[in-house]
Amino acid sequence: MSDLRDFAAVFGLFADVGFQVLNIHGIVLLKRLRTDMPRPLVPIITSRLKVRELSKDDLEPVFDTLRPETSGGRVFEKTTVSEAERWLHNRMAEHSELGYSIWGIEKKNSDFVGLCGLIPWEPVPMICYAVRKTFQGNGYGTEAAKAVMERAAEEFGSIVSTVRITNGASIRVAEKIGMRVSETSISDDRTLRSFVYP
C-alpha cells in the first residue's frame, strides 16, 4: 500500500510540472508533455519541400519508407503493412498529445518523399529522418532535417541525434546540417555516434 501511495504522489508531482508518468511492466518512464508552444512546429516549408503532419492516407508511402530495404535497419523499421499502420497511428496520436512527432516530407507536387521529425527524449527531443528509396540521392533528407532541426531548436534549445556508425548516409546528413559529435558509445553490440545541435 505504501508503494502505491508513493507512486501516486510521484505521479501527481510530475503531472503538475508537465510530465506523463507511464508504468510499463513495472518500469516507470517519464514523458514530457508540451502544452506551451507559442506556435505549431509544422508545417515547415523549404525551397523544395514541405514537412507536415501525417494522416491515415499516408499509409502506403509510410510503409514504403519504413521497409527494411529503405530504412537501413533503423529502430522504426517495419516489415508488414499492419506494423506500419500501427506505427502511423501512434505517430499521429503522439503529435496530437505532444505537439511533435515524426512527420511526412513531401515535394511541392505532393509526392511523398519520406519521414523526418522528433522522437520524445530527455532532456531534449531526438531528430530522425528516412527517405524513400525512389527519392534518395537528391538531398531531400538533408534539406528536411536541417529545416526541422532549426525550427525544433527554437522551441527546445537544442536537438540530439544518435546514428549507427555503419550508417554513413545518416552520419553525413547530421554533419551537413551542422550537428556536432557529442560522444561515441556501444549499445547492443552496435557502435553509435551521438550528435547535438547547436
Image (cartoon, grey):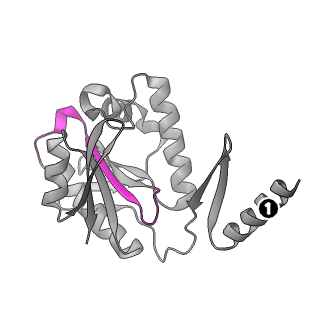
Residue 49 lies in the magenta-colored region = no
Report the residue at 24% width, 36% height from top.
Answer: 132
Q: Which residue is mark 1?
A: 6
Q: Nearer the viewer, residue 1 or 41?
A: 1
- Mark 1 crowd level (few <14, some 14–19, many ≥20, 10 Å Cα): few
Q: Name the secondary structure under disc 1.
A: helix
Report the residue at 69% width, 67% height from top.
Answer: 15
* The C terminus lies in quadrant: bottom left
Which residue extends farthest left?
Answer: 137
Residue 22 image offset from top left, x and y in percent: 65, 52
Q: Is residue 177 left or right of residue 88?
A: left
Q: Is residue 105 left or right of residue 33?
A: left
Amino acid type of the residue that numbered disc 1 sits on in the rendered structure: Asp
Residue 98 image offset from top left, x and y in percent: 54, 60
Residue 102 image offset from top left, x and y in percent: 40, 50
Q: Is residue 42 left or right of residue 86?
A: left
Report the residue at 53% width, 42% height from top.
Answer: 90
When asked about the image quadrant of residue 144, the answer is bottom left
When asked about the image quadrant of residue 138, the answer is top left
The answer to whether residue 112 is seen in the rendering is no
Q: Is residue 128 left or right of residue 166?
A: right
Q: Which residues are magenta?
A: 120-138
Residue 140 image offset from top left, x and y in percent: 18, 49
Q: How many marks?
A: 1
